[in-house]
Amino acid sequence: MAARLAGLSPNLASRFTPGTLISSYEIVEAVKRGIAVPFRKSDPEQVRKFSALQAADRGGLMFQPVPGTFENVEEIDFTSMYPSIIVQSNLSPETVGHSERVGFLPTVLKPLLELRIKTKQLKKTEPRFAGTDAILKWMLVTCFGYTGYKNAKFGRIEVHEGITGRSREILIQTKDIADEMNFHVLHGIVDCLWLQGSPVDVLKERIERETGLFLEVEHFDWIVFLPLADGFGAYNRYYGRQPDGKNIKVRGIAARRHDTPEYVREMQRRMLDVMAHAKTIAELETKREEVVAIYRETINNLNAANPRQMVINRRISRLTYAHRCIEGAAVQAYRDHGIGIAPGMKIQFVVTDARLYRVEPAWCAKSFDPGYYRELVDKAWGEISFALTSGNQNRPLDAV
């Protein structure tokens, strides 16, 4: 699919980023339409007043949730919101200040968007479409990002700002509709809202009709919004049980993060598997002893664990560090073993002495620092234990 869209060989398409694929697709479509594509773009951002930047350059809108566990929650998610806004609002570099023109970006993205809407539905019953859906999703996502990239051949910062501006309007409009229909909004992130109430099908139909965008609805028997260190709700750390009971949807917690050691990840996975059998908050609280037993077992077996279970994965962004840190020590450890590294590379290492910033590459580590990994275990446990603590359920929205 990616190779056909981008006009590249499968060998190249399999190794390129979604950004390169969408850029190649746009170039192919431009050539088909007889549009000249500059070899090197020279279109710097115009000088603007600070007040204009303050009004336009705000990014996506988010509501800050109150930490807690909530029952019978609906997640409404706009399908490919930003690409949909590009198409719907005719946003393209050549339409800035000339809205009467038919934009290039809306024209070339519309077929991809329509195909994405179809594959997102098809993959629910036919798993073979999941790969195609993922390719289309990330190509469309990076298309939005490239509108604000100065070197993108079809990018312009005003288009980027126009997209995020419209998204803020849509999220506020959606919340207002939900409030009017007596739904209780719990949280919102750019293109998603979590709320309580019914009938959600009627709400979905009205939002789609008034915004012109497609929605997906997911139900949660219960969902947990985790707190930040200051006590306010975290925007992107949550997990919840869906009706099928097969698994728990997780975002931002240890079991989801790519840098979590397998020993810690496995503990949290086991806990979530136990919690998945609880259909209500009341049933969730009855699982506490079983989950605590997993935590105690993990702590008791920590010292005897295999160092290979303690491997941390990191993608490095730099080669030099102003202060001593674990990541900097890992970079040096790779150098000491004669391994050449560069920004963007993924490294794997085990912390052998956190106090002295000593680490070893994953393939030669024979020991690890139990104290350091105990802290990681406790942090992952905190993400789970919060849901099992009474008094954190069903609080109102604290929107910002």
Image (spheres, rainbow, N blue to C red):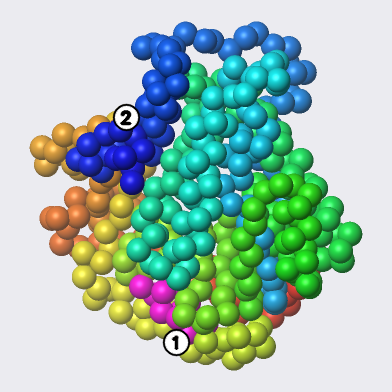
On the question of residue 129 being in view, the answer is yes
Residue 128 picture location, percent across and down:
35, 63
Give above or below for 80 relative to 127. above
Residue to which mark 2 is pinned? 320
Residue 216 sits in which quadrant?
A: bottom right
Give the spatial CA distance, label 1 vs label 2: 43 Å
Instruction: Answer with left or right where residue 54 lies relative to residue 387.
Output: right
Residue drawn at the location 76% of the way across and 25% of the way down: 55
Residue 225 picture location, percent across and down:
64, 64
Give the magenta range: 266-275
Residue to which mark 1 is pinned? 293
Residue furthest left as drawn? 338
93 or 270, which lies in front? Answer: 93
Residue 64 on the magenta span: no
236 or 341, which lies in front? Answer: 236
Instruction: Answer with left or right where residue 288 lies relative to residue 209.
Output: left
Q: Amino acid at mark 1?
A: Ala
